[in-house]
Amino acid sequence: MSLWLNAGVHAPEAAGRAGRGADVMLKVYAKCVDGRREVADQRILEALVM
């Protein structure tokens, strides 16, 4: 799961494929998602500019 999340798979999609609820999955795996801050910052900036 952490591999999928770090690869950019959206949490609800990853959870569904793993047979878990997204809320439970994020509680367990949120700490495993590393190095995505820059990507998130860029996506937020792009969304604000649109």
Image (spheres, grey):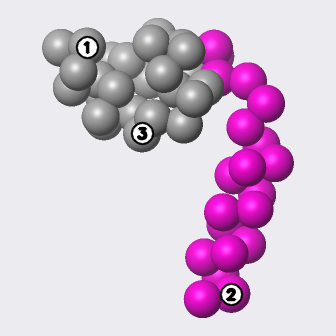
Q: Main secondary structure of the magenta part?
A: helix
Residue at 29% x, 34% y is 13
Q: Identity of the amino acid at label 1?
A: Ala
Structural crowding at the residue carrying mark 2, measured as other residues with C-alpha within 10 Å and reported as few (<14), some (14–19) or many (≥20) = few
From the viewer's side, name the closer residue of 23 and 11: 11
What is the quadrant of residue 14 in the picture? top left
Residue found farthest to the bottom: 50
Which residue position holds label 1?
A: 18
Between the C-alphas of marks 3 and 1, the distance is 12 Å
Image position of 35 (left or right of 1): right
Q: Identity of the amino acid at label 3?
A: His
Image position of 16 (left or right of 10): left
In percent of width and height, residue 35 lies at 79, 30
Residue at 73% x, 24% y is 34
Residue 48 sits inside the magenta stretch = yes
Between the C-alphas of marks 1 and 2, the distance is 35 Å
Label 3, secondary structure: give it: loop
Residue 42 sits inside the magenta stretch = yes
Q: Which label's residue is closer to the chain start, 3 or 1?
A: 3
Give the residues drawn in magenta, as a range.
31-50
Q: Which label's residue is closer to the chain start, 3 or 2?
A: 3
Which residue position holds label 3?
A: 10
Structural crowding at the residue carrying mark 1, measured as other residues with C-alpha within 10 Å and reported as few (<14), some (14–19) or many (≥20) = few
Q: Is residue 21 visible?
A: no
Which residue position holds label 2?
A: 49
Residue at 64% x, 16% y is 31
From the viewer's side, name the closer residue of 23 and 32: 32
